[in-house]
Image (cartoon, grey):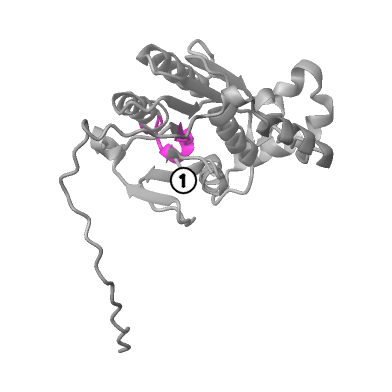
Amino acid sequence: MGMRAAIVVGATGLTGSSLVEQLCENDEYVSVTVIARRKPTFKHPKLEVKICDFDRLEEQDIAFAHELYCCLGTTIKKAGSRKVFEKVDFEYPLAIASLAKKRGIPHFLVITAMGAKESSPFYYNRVKGKLEHDLMELGLQQLSIIRPSLLVGERNEFRLGEKVGEKVLKLAKPLLIGPLKRFRAIEASQVAKAMMIIALHGKQQPVTIYPSHELAILAFPETVEEDVSRETLFNWDKIKKADSLHEEDKVNRNVVIDREKYTIHDKVVDEEVRFRPYDKE
């Protein structure tokens, strides 16, 4: 069992909720802390929940951890305005990353979007691109940028646009081959799994961007058990050879004590030891 600790921000969303469950079930992690505005429904002995106002989040609200997973994200429709959308998808992640750097958290993993680019013609992708740029400028110890395609899975809320997109991509999946594979929809649970694999076995470099088609195929390394034969395990000839030392190699166990150098000041008195019967209550 490992001794890792993780922090998850955005744990009540589609990917974040799956990530929390997978982290808690993974033997490498002994502690999983969720920082959220509302309490998640999932419970686990490893899980600690901190209810915080992200507008007032301070350094002491974030304890040390080996990884901080940022799964914050919303839509303009749900946010109600571009200003609120930018606060959730840009300002909060950047502020949390800054606090993580101050706390010495070595690895920050963040979900952006497949088309994230500052010069994108699409507003959503421009915001995500600006977030990536500013996170890189922050100088984190290690930054992993997760760029999934359309996320699919069972949501607690109905999103018409995403449902339509999911059906279209599902029908088009057989046609999305070769370079077009990157446009395939991806299960949120696979993205969560990929983030954990990246944290435990990913590239050890300052900044790494993981596109959707790479996230889709990431899997934990297979554990190879060494096949040890009984002949190798019980090689008595080898054991006997190791036990048969040359006389000159043996340790001389005759210990000579220089009594003039060492003086014993305490006396050892042998006393009769008596045991009192155990009193049963």
Q: Residue at x 36, y 15 (%)?
A: 138
**The image quarter in which residue 1 lies:** top right
Image vertical order of residue 181 relative to residue 162, above or below: above
Image location of residue 44, percent across then percent down: 48, 56
Please give left or right for residue 135 compared with residue 247 in the image: left
233 or 70: which is nearer to us? 233
Residue range in magenta is 69-85
Q: Which residue is mark 1?
A: 30
Please give left or right for residue 281 compared with residue 211 in the image: left
Q: Is residue 114 visible?
A: no
Q: Residue at x 22, y 35 (%)?
A: 262
Image location of residue 45, percent across then percent down: 45, 56
Image location of residue 98, percent across then percent down: 32, 24
Please give left or right for residue 89 compared with residue 54 in the image: right
218 or 36: which is nearer to us? 218
Q: Secondary structure at mark 1?
A: strand
Image vertical order of residue 58 relative to residue 206, above or below: below
Q: Is residue 81 magenta?
A: yes
Tell me the amino acid under the disc marked 1. Val
Image location of residue 22, percent across then percent down: 57, 45
**The image quarter in which residue 197 lies:** top right
Q: Is residue 142 magenta?
A: no
Q: Residue at x 56, y 18 (%)?
A: 209
Quadrant in the picture for the C terminus: bottom left
| Number of numbered discs | 1
Q: Is residue 259 visible?
A: yes
Label 1 neighbourhood size at 10 Å, few (<14), some (14-19), many (20+)? some
Image vertical order of residue 200 relative to residue 34, above or below: above
Q: Residue furthest left?
A: 265
